[in-house]
Amino acid sequence: MIHPTAIVDPSARIGAGVAIGAYSIVGADVEIGDGTSVGPHVVIEGRTRIGRDNRIFQFASLGAAPQDKKFAGEASDLVIGDRNHIREFVTMHRGTAGGGGVTRVGDDNWFLAYSHVAHDCRVGNHCVFSNNATIAGHVEVGDHVIASGFVGVHQFCRIGAHAFIGMGVLLSGDVPPFLMVAADADTQGRPRGINSEGLKRRGFDAERIAAIKRAYRTIYVGGTPLSEARARLAEQARDSTDVAQMLAFIEASERALAR
């Protein structure tokens, strides 16, 4: 299953049923799980661990040194879960000592062409990064997030679960769970309601969606100060685990919210 032109270090750990295409390079500290397919001209290097049944397409680059001037060659990791689709020219970099040393990607994600996951990022499960969607260092992305084409996320930002980020958005603040964000004329992302269609597709009933909408209005409609909005959310969270999730996200934010 390994093409004769591929260069695979003898110490790399290659699982059962792994296919490695022509001219691909797999380094010494790489581990590839069972059933994963690596296309031609792929480079996988550094301490990179890839799970089972992933599909990695041609010209992807995984596990390269981070694009961080503070990086001094310290040991660091890229950890990728199971059943991810990693398309052409996708780049994912290892972590840094200052960010915990690990870049981590979950399961069942789709990374379309030219998308980028920088050092020390955390990406959850069932996410979609459309073409040219890029996240800078230390970004955290929850489960079921969709980042449309040409999205750019500033370092240290957080995106909550089930959020939808519209095409061309530039994010410099945290996005709570369930929100839909679109670009203004200056391309800065602003909340535009909740991702109700996505929630319906994932089985959220009308009562849950209504509670999330009330929470959104509490935060973003009417100009309520955030301190007062948080107090109101605490009351609403008594009857909704989804609102409790939004409140917990906001309480943990170290950056300003996208507003």
Image: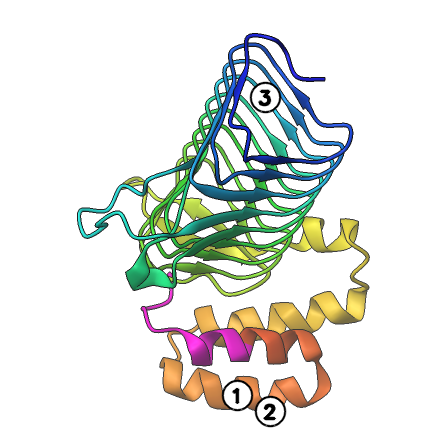
Residue type at mark 1 is Arg
* Residue pointed to by mark 2: 235
Q: Which residue is drawn at 60% across and 8% down?
A: 4
Label 3: which secondary element:
loop
Q: What span is colored magenta in the figure? A: 247-258
68, above or below 225, in the image: above
Q: Is residue 220 magenta?
A: no
Residue type at mark 3 is Phe
Circle number at residue 232:
1
* Residue pointed to by mark 3: 57
In-front residue for pair 106/232 = 106
Where the N terminus falls, by quadrant? top right
Q: How far apart are marks 2 and 3 (CA)?
A: 48 Å
Where the C terminus falls, by quadrant? bottom left
Residue 200 coordinates in the image, percent (x, y): 77, 53
Residue type at mark 2 is Glu
- For the rendered model, the colour scheme is rainbow
Foreground mark, 2 or 3, reads 3
Q: As drawn, is 195 to the left or to the right of 224?
A: right
Q: Residue at x 65, y 38 (%)?
A: 84
